[in-house]
Amino acid sequence: MKVLVTGGAGFIGSNLCEYLLTEGHIVRCLDNFATGKPENIFPLLEKYPQTFSLQVGDIRKIEDCRKAVEDMEYVLHEAALGSVPRSIKDPITTNDVNIGGFMNMLVAARDAGIKRFVFAASSSTYGDSKSLPKVEDVIGKPLSPYAITKYVDELYADVFARTYGIEYIGLRYFNVFGRRQDPFGAYAAVIPLFVKKFMNHEAPNINGDGEYSRDFTYIDNVIQMNVLALTTTNPEAVNQIYNTAFGERTTLNQLVTYLKEYLSDFDSEIAKIEPTHGPNRTGDIPHSLACVDKAKRLLGYDPKYSMKQGLKEAVKWYWENI
């Protein structure tokens, strides 16, 4: 396959690039390094000089998108500005990247005759829906600018499928974590942030009482979903949105307990560190738990890593790499 990975230098994107390259596919990465990191992909450029290429570009520029899809067959659209707090602080840039950039990529993919457009959607789309587990066709009102942008992307993909015949699959990611997820910066995700804090012998700060829960999803399960979305030949499976998760709920208090246990294997002092607590964060969904039955039924999804299994792998990676 010839696959364009937008945001290919990011956490999820670089893992997708690496997997596809090891499987012998031709991969192009489009990234402007706003949040992606050169060190995530430069080793891949050296290792796969014949099958991997980098285009430095911005999805907000239609000409960059058109150039990126040239001679490609498939798109994995991972490029986005993530983070609910960032979107609340700067809704205009989040909108420009996540909606304007998404539209540019859809148009470029349409005009280039891309076979299938697989994109990163988000569990934030469920908004204020109280139902658990989250089922794809039952959503609430979005609680942040970021959530709005990711829902609008789903709507645009559906309209392009109906109007122009594009094949798409949207993957609603649920709190993905694993190797290469950045622990630094103002908008670091909770797992790498807490790992970094513990490794520095600092107390992590939990927003609220710690009983908010998430369906933490290890990166290898996400890779599996993307590959299934790219390769499925089931006509019923395309032009659909899927939860991409393990289907298990973990509170932040439980997460801290697991992290202390696994990190203590490397540094026994970490077991003594107790977290602090602050106010709940604006725009946060209290509880998130995915139903993955649709993905299992239509795509043959079979996640291999539970949250705890993935967390052990992630902790080991962080200990060796940061």
Image (cartoon, helix red, strand yellow):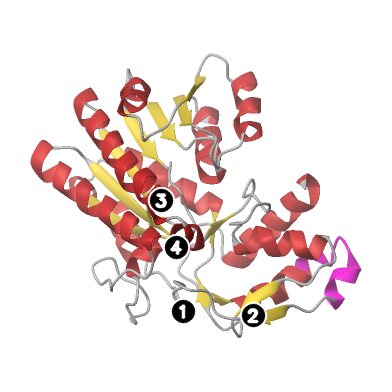
Whether residues under marks 4 and 1 lie with C-beta atoms below 8 angstroms apart, the answer is no
Tag in front: 4 or 2: 4
Give how far across and how far down residue 246 sits, in percent: 48, 64
Q: Is residue 140 above or below residue 1?
A: below
Magenta stretch? 262-272
Residue count near mark 2 (Cα–Cα under 10 Å), binned few <14, some 14–19, many ≥20:
few
Residue 286: mark: 1
Amino acid type, mark 2: Gly
Q: Is residue 79 above or below residue 203?
A: above
Distance between mark 3 and mark 1 Cα atoms: 22 Å
- Label 1 SS: loop
Quarter of the view holding residue 111: top left
Tag in front: 4 or 1: 4
Q: Which residue is tagged 2?
A: 278
Whether residues under marks 3 and 1 lie with C-beta atoms below 8 angstroms apart, the answer is no
Tag in front: 1 or 2: 2
Give how far across and how far down residue 221 sits, in percent: 50, 53
